[in-house]
Amino acid sequence: MLHIKYVEANGTEYLVETDAGFNAMEVAVKNGIPGIDGDCGGAAACATCHVYVDPGWIEKTGKAAEGLEQSMLEFAEDVQDNSRLACQIKLDDALDGLVLKLPEKQH
Amino acid sequence: MSIATLEANPALSVPLDKIDVSNPDLFVNDTVGDYFTRLREEDPVHYCAESAYGPYWSITKYKDIMAVDTNHQVFSSEAGVGGIIIDDNNVRSEGLPLRSFITMDPPEHDAQRKTVSPIVAPSNLMVLEKTIRERMQNILDRLPVGEEFDWVDNVSIELTTQMLATLFDFPFEERRRLTRWSDVTTAEPGSGIIDSWEQRSKELQECAASFMTLWNERVNKKEPGNDLISMLAHSPATRNMPPEEFLGNILLLIVGGNDTTRNSMTGSVLALNRFPKEFEKLKANHALIDSMVPEVIRWQTPLAHMRRTALEDHEVGGKTIRKGDKVVMWYLSGNRDEDMIERPNELIIDRARPRQHLSFGFGVHRCVGNRLAEMQLKILWEEILARFSHIEVLKEPERVRSNFVRGYSYMPVRLHA
């Protein structure tokens, strides 16, 4: 069991609990976090689950992977160095306490 | 199923290797669905050796379509190897390939797409929303209540064409020329829209000339306007495009911003007539518009397919696709895949995950205007529900003769106050 914190652009925080083995998009959708759609179901193919990894966690999650994840982020809004697609962040016990910030808007 | 129905339905009796789902007759009669159902069950990655468009593969299952759509390294969209439509002729005009960012692979695709994407970014959509709503109110207020009229021409075409004229800052009174060019771009001889490929080239050259005039007016302005032509004229990625690439990109934006939403608008009215219980649900709870809109876009699937060309041998669903083969992803079939979507033939406006559908494609070519399309449909239905109790479809609509654009040319309706 681990905890993930999602923070909306306006500062609203959502602390959710999950088993390991899911990805951060699935957990967000399951818990009704606003602004994470996950249209493609986790294939890094739509960029509707763009998040900013809290700088303190980026080493553990790693940066966006080369290939499709980076390609899709090319077309997202306000992409930063710590941008990831949540569906590509696989949650395990090492990420207990992870903080993910949401962009203002995404499409 | 009785033997009589089996005999009556060629989709069930034709030998598997003779199934050719590209035949436009199957789309104009809306009978292609049974063929897709059979392929999904018996031969989901299907090779058709002979068709009007030459040999091609059909990809019919949702997951296989996703695998092809997200693998642009193997499955190319490049105009020079065939483009994105089953008909090779469609990607040419006067013998030259009509290149645009939808018929390019990364990295060239990425730079051009990023040039135009700000027009459909969330911040700009908020600006557009007011204009769109005012226009919809105007158009809907002028419709006759209790009389028969054509929904396609009076509402769907008019609304999307006005939108397109705004995005291009195209002379407003001449906007129906955009509708014509949109129809011509995706047409083939025999469709009833053009008689020959030469006619198509000629009309598309008129389009190029018209847009070149607007480009020349805008290219030297110090403060570039917030319209698509100014954006293309002022971006380093697009300002030096060769003529056929200029025309290619203009046509892409015309078709993408017009034909698709037009047919989803008509489809939304048709769907809610076919599924009256869903319409009752919607009337009882207007908040369901948010999930009804993507569900309608799935149900309609305004573009039936996208095509790719294999750059190397590759396995899909247990079949080996060879280098150079034409691969057609049938979004219309994937959106009816029972393994991914429950009761897929039905419109269910409160599905749990309505945006999980293939109508916008997936991967780097995913529709850039998807949220604009949804916004237009959302506003349309908000304004419809504020005015009318029912839009009654009076006859089966007439459909477009195309295996690419899944659309309507005529749908008589009557409004109830």
Image (tube, helix red, strand yellow):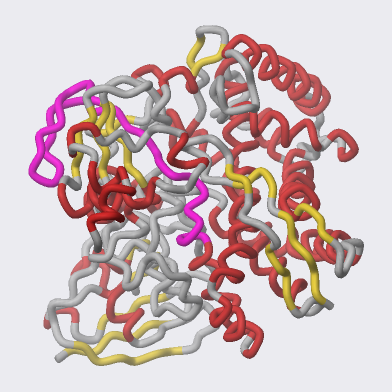
Residue shown at 79%/28% (left/top)? B218
| Quadrant assignment, res B122 | bottom right
Return the x and y of residue B221 as percentages of the image width and height.
81, 30
Query: Does the image show residue B108?
Result: no
Image side of residue B28 versus residue B54, left or right:
right
Query: Does the image show residue B398?
Result: yes
Quadrant of the image containing the N terminus of chain A = bottom left
Q: Is residue B300 above or below residue B239?
A: below
Residue shown at 23%/39% (left/top)? B14
For this rendering, which residue is in front, B209 or A72? B209
Image side of residue B148 versus residue B269, left or right:
right
For this rendering, which residue is in front, A96 or B347? B347
Image side of residue B12 versus residue B396, left or right:
left
Return the x and y of residue B299 as percentages of the image width and height.
47, 61
Specify the segment rendered in magenta: B297-325
Q: Is residue B279 above or below residue B243?
A: below
Residue B403 painted magenta: no
Residue shown at 60%/76% (left/top)? B289
Q: Is residue A91 above or below residue B258?
A: below
Return the x and y of residue B116 as percentages of the image width and height.
60, 41
For this rendering, which residue is in front, B37 or B317? B37
**How many tags in the picture?**
0
Return the x and y of residue B113 as percentages of the image width and height.
51, 39
For this rendering, which residue is in front, B9 or B100? B9
Image side of residue B3 versus residue B189, left or right:
left
| Quadrant assignment, res B124 | bottom right
Residue shown at 61%/9% (left/top)? B198
